[in-house]
């Protein structure tokens, strides 16, 4: 029973974290367009702060528990999924640093956000595919 609760928390935390990543992308796109900080961007920024870090911490903690409990840590699909999660974690850090710089120093980020958004959705979709199908 505890396994299924942890699995549910893991899936929920992935949804929360990915939502935070999308909000980070929206903020960075707004910064690149040099849109004035509006009430909406402030709301998005506060939600992103509240969602991203807790979601990320829950993804890692529950994911490690599930991997150990399911003995998946030697599976090839799991290694690929972990690589994707490492990359997404790095993207989270890059996005957060650029957002922080923009709001503290008004430094406009030079990231290719359309490419990052596309990569974000492809990686999340592929990770979900790996978890569901477990192809190898």
Image: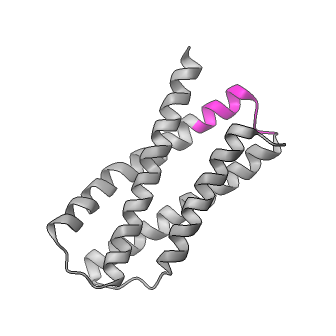
Q: Is residue 109 above or below residue 125?
A: below
Query: Where does the magenta region start and end?
Result: 63-74
In which image quadrant can residue 77 be found? top right
Task: Classify the position of the C terminus by image quarter.
Answer: top right
Q: Compare residues 36 and 65 and report the one nearer the observer.
A: 36
Query: Residue 83: horizontal and vertical position, in percent?
Result: 69, 55
Secondary structure mainly formed by the magenta segment: helix
Q: Is residue 3 above or below residue 24?
A: above
Residue 73 painted magenta? yes
Q: Residue furthest top?
A: 1
- Estimate the x, y position of residue 4 in percent, counting from the top left: 56, 21
Q: Residue at x 48, y 81 (%)?
A: 111
Q: Residue at x 31, y 76 (%)?
A: 30
Is-magenta flag for residue 102? no
Residue 34: x, y in percent? 28, 85
**The quarter of the displayed image where residue 46 is located:** bottom left
Q: Horizontally, is 13 left or right of 72 in the view?
A: left
Image check: 66 left or right of 79? left
Name the quadrant of the N terminus: top right
Count of numbered circles in the view: 0
Residue nearest the observer in this picture, 47 or 135: 135
The relative height of residue 35 versus residue 119 in the rendered view (above or below) is below
């Amino acid at each position: 029973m505890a396994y299924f609760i942890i699995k549910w928390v893991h899936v929920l935390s992935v949804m929360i974290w990915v939502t935070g990543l999308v909000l980070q992308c929206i903020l960075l796109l707004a910064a690149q367009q040099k849109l004035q900080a509006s009430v909406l961007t402030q709301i998005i920024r506060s939600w992103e702060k509240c969602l991203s870090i807790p979601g990320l911490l829950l993804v890692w903690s529950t994911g490690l528990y599930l991997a150990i409990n399911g003995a998946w840590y030697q599976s090839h699909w799991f290694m690929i999924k972990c690589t994707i999660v490492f990359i997404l974690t790095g993207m989270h850090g890059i996005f957060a640093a650029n957002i922080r710089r923009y709001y503290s120093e008004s430094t406009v980020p030079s990231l290719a956000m359309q490419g990052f958004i596309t990569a974000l959705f492809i990686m999340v979709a592929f990770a979900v595919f790996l978890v569901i199908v477990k192809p190898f």
